Structure formats: C-alpha cells, structure tokens
Amino acid sequence: MSDKLEFTGERFLPGASGEIWYEHWHRYHFAAELVAGREVLDVACGAGYGSALLARQAQRVVGADISADTIDHARAVYAAVPNLEFRQADCAALPFADASFDAVVSFETIEHIAAQEKFLDEVRRVLRPEGLFLLSSPNKLEYSDRRGCSNEYHVRELYRDELAALLAARFPHLRWFGQRMSFFSVVWPEDAAARGELFEVSEASATEVSPGHARPLYFIVAASRSAETIGGVVPRLSVLADRNEWVYADYAQAFANQKIQLERGNTLDGVVAEWQEHSREAVRQRDALQAARAAQAAEYAAERAGLARQIDAQQHEIERRASLRWWLALPWRRIRAALKRAPPLA
C-alpha cells in the first residue's frame, strides 16, 4: 500500500487484506474480458489498480475519481501505462462529451452517493448507443439487513428491485450476476473447461442440492441500450482463487491466537484460584485475631472491673478511718487487742 494513501475503509487500496481484497480484484478480473478492445471509462476508480488491470486488454482506459489526492497517486503509480489516463471528476457531472466511450465500469459507487439518478444519467450520456455499462452494488437485504451491518460510508443502499428500476429506466437490457465470499471446493479440468456449474449444499443436508448461490452479497449488472451488446455478455461462472490462501492463513492464525488465549486463561484461572485461597486464609487469620482480641478485651474488662471494686473498697475504708468516731474508738480497740494477746491468769 502506498505511503501517500491511508486505508480508511471508504475505498479499497492494494495491500488491504481480507474479504475486500477478494471482492474488488474479482470484479475487475471479471470485467476485463468484457471490455477487451474497447474505450473504457472507470468511474470512481480510486487508487487506479482496477483501471490499470482493464488497460491490459482494453484499447484505452480513463480512470475518474472525485478525490484529487487519489488521482495524483494513480497518475504517479501507473504513469508508464501508455493507454491509461486519470481525470478528477464528479460521477454526477462527468467532464466528457456525449457518446465518448464503448464501456463504463463503476464498482461500488452508487451506494456512496445521493445523486444516484444523476450518476446513471451521466453514464448513459457518455456511453455510445451500443455501449456496455458494468456496475456493482451491495444487496441491501444481505449486506445490511440480515447481517445487522451499517457502513458509515454508504449513503443509500439498494434492494434488487430498486436497483433494477433505476437501471431499467435508462438501460432496457440487463444481465445480472451475483457475488459473494464463501467457502468452495473447486474441481477443475486440466484441459479447457467445456462447461461450469455451481451448486449449494449445507452440512445439515449435504444430499440436498440447490442450483447456484441463493444469497448474493453484491449485484454485478451488465446494462446496455443494445440487446445485441447484452447478448454478447455470456452468463458465465467466474471463480477467483487465492494463490496464497489468505482465508486459511487468517483462520490458522486466529485459531493459534485462540489457543494462546485459552492457555493464558487456564494459567490465569490457576493464579486466580491460588490467590483466592490466599485470600480465604487471610480471612481466617483475621477472624482468629479478631476473636483473640475480643477475648483479651473481655479479660481486660473483667480485671478492670475487679480493680475498680478493690479501689472502691479501699476508698470506703479510708473514708471510714478518716471519721472522728473511728479515732475515738481506736484506744479501746488497741486495749482489746492487747488483752487478747495477754496470757490467761493462773
């Protein structure tokens, strides 16, 4: 990915990985054969990678995008491609003369703008009467409704009937294709294929076969004012295979990370259990200390109460002895005590 352009999610840039890589590259590879030998306009061309791919088979390609920075980037990267040029342009006000192109390609554009009718009017205007228009658009039912997805860069997504109505008003002849990322087991001949097939099964009912793929995430539509032009768009099956198998590598990494997290979780569970036991032991020691402290406090209180009683008795004795009556009686107490100690008379 170029250092000059940052991948924000609004437009695909070469170097971005994941599903978006499969989706965008496959569309341009699919379109390349259909525009071979034609003069082509690639509307909302972004970084220009798709325009450059089309230029390998097309007679001439013009990439147009509203972003000046993106156009400058594309011009710099693909300056050596002789039949390729780039123009800054608003898709709802294309700066080209009427009937300038044999084909217009515009992938993942219509959902990003509010002026959808004006955009399609401009495409029709710059196309020659027998020209071919190729566009892609998210299938709102699958892309947003069923997945609970909300793309912040999408202004207005379309259901199939809405897209069909917009196109049919300008291009009476349409050929529909569906696109979706999925898992496939591919069987192919070493010789050139004589025919192709696509069918669906599920793990729960592997013997029940459904033809085709019932849930396109994106629509790819070939449109034209010419029935002959659309007749030349063969309803073919196209499969893009990833030589590096990114999906499997990503899943392998995800599983490895999950295993690491599980092991860390088990380790943390052991640490938590150990600290919980430490905590319980600390609670037991605290309770024992509190009980000992309470016993000591009770013993101290009892001793203090006993001392208080002794002090009260002493105080009472002091007060008694301090009275006059006690002192007057003291000589008689001493005489009685002496008599008790004297020996008896013979």
Image: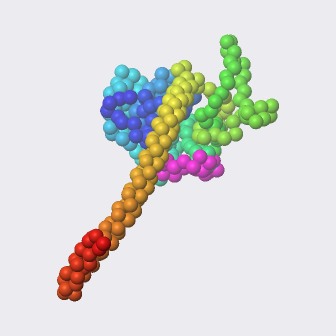
Residue 314 located left or right of residue 291: left
Tell me where the magenta segment starts and ends, as one range. Answer: 145-166
The stretch drawn in magenta includes residue 160: yes
Q: How many marks?
A: 0
Q: Residue at x 59, y 46 (%)?
A: 147
Give x and y (percent) for residue 102.
52, 33
Q: Can residue 316 be seen in this view?
A: yes
Q: Residue at x 68, y 12 (%)?
A: 191
Residue 129 located left or right of residue 68: right
Give x and y (percent) for residue 154.
48, 48
Res. 35 image quadrant:
top right
Compared with 37, 143 (above or below) is: below
Foreground of the two, 12 or 317? 317
Compared with 191, 69 (above or below) is: below
Q: Residue at x 38, y 42 (%)?
A: 66
Looking at the figure, which quarter contains the C terminus? bottom left
Residue at the limit of the structure toward the right, as seen here = 207
Q: Residue at x 54, y 20 (%)?
A: 243
The stretch drawn in magenta includes residue 13: no
Query: What secondary structure characterizes most of the magenta part?
Result: loop
Res. 179 image quadrant:
top right
Q: Is residue 121 visible?
A: no
Give x and y (percent) for residue 124.
52, 43
Residue at the limit of the structure toward the front, as seen here = 346
Give x and y (percent) for residue 76.
32, 27
